[in-house]
Image (cartoon, helix red, strand yellow):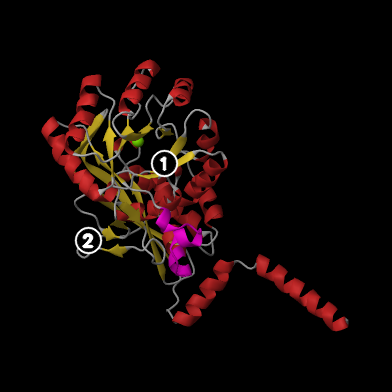
Amino acid sequence: MTDRRTFLKSAGLLTAAAAVINPAQIFARNNRSESGKPQGKKELELEWCPFMAKMKHVFTIANSSRSTTPIVLTKITYDGYTGYGEAAMPPYLGESIASATEFLKKARPVLKKFSSPFMIGEIMAEIDAITTYNAAAKASIDIALHDLVGNIFGQPWWKIWGFDPKNCPDNSFTVGLASKEEVKVKAKEAAAEGHLIKVKLGRTEEQDKMMINTIREVTDTPICIDANQGWKDKYYALDMINWLNTKNVNMIEQPMPKYALEETGWLTERSPLPIMADESCQRLTDVRRLHGYFSGINIKLMKCTGLHEAREMVSLAQALHMRLMIGCMTETSVAIAAGAQIAPVCEWTDLDGNWLIANDCFTSSKVIDGKVIAKDAPGLGLTMNKGADLKFASEE
Ligand code: MG
């Protein structure tokens, strides 16, 4: 009896101990001792490198066009391990290489306060508190931390989170606003590269319908629409959506201005197609606010400060029965590989940012059968491309 009691007592203690020991600590300890990897400094060391992404084609949406995207790549090292991150900053987001660099200078001493990279939630809370804005710069730290910690665990994040890449939906490939002949060429290219075509609408009715009819002359591939807030009148928007519903369109993103919530709610109630929030949805706090007005949300790492918050947005949206999409900016494979970790729980993925740039500096997730599939490799599964001349440095 005594033996049994002692056994139960020690078993109970073991169970309790297992509950409080962070599995990350066990893994990191085992990984180090087994691999015999030389140990580096146990300090979070942040460096960065400005990078100008050159677009393959001039990119046009409802209110702007451009041929480059400013990016700042980040690198965090800890104990001999490395993680890479990225801030991609299309000009309409209001961030720049200068503002991101200023932010990273402030973030560097904050990271040094932490003795390990595992408490990503706590670290990101402090990083977030540095300023109100700089979401992309914050994401560059979050993504590098995830790559770093995944590398230490020896596992990709989709696996750590228990997601199944078999559930990834077909990816969409964007066809920008262009002339009729250009649209035909791009639509064929898009149909070959992805299983869905994403079309940016929101100019005149004639131009918008021309885009769709032209695409339908060359392919039957399903289309996702992004109006980028371009429709100002709810009755017009509903007429357009009803017409689009006859053209094998399966989703409408941000039909109306981001603050036109009541009108969007009216539209969502009557629309035969799901209405997704993009410009209206930035961060976790927006998800509950948009519930009832949109069918779902488009999560973008550069707006929501990275994977930690994106994962929380996924859980909240699922709890609210809202539909999920993961999108991107014009990004290198670093941020696309991060987005690809979330892809298995989304109904739509719009992770074509790295296909649009001519000078990608990393390789990671692969397009398999029209789907963007994250690699089954530690962290974000990143390999730096040969000839990528990246010089990471820091200053406070
Ligand atoms: Mg959009």
Task: Point out residue 68 in the picture as x, y percentages from the top left corner.
Answer: 22, 43
Expressed as whole percent of the image width and height from the top left, the position of residue 113 reads: 53, 59
Closest to the observer: 336 or 5? 5
The total number of labels drawn is 2
Counting from the top left corner in percent of width and height, residue 130 is at 49, 45
Please report the bounds of the magenta region as a residue range.
150-167
- Whether the residues at callouts 2 and 1 have beta carbons within 8 Å, the answer is no
What is the CA distance from the residue labelled 2 to the residue labelled 1?
A: 27 Å
Please give left or right for residue 264 compared with residue 383 in the image. right
Q: Which mark is residue 252?
A: none
Residue 374 left/right relative to 163: left
| Badge 1 element | helix
Label 1: which residue?
A: 303
Ligand 1's quadrant:
top left
- In the rendered image of this protein, does residue 126 appear above or below residue 114? above
Quadrant in which the C terminus is drawn:
bottom left
Q: Is residue 129 visible?
A: no
Give the residue type that dot 1 points to: Lys
364 vs 396, left or right, is left
Dominant secondary structure, magenta: helix
Give the quadrant of residue 93: top left
Q: Which residue is mark 2?
A: 389
Front residue (pair 27, 326): 326
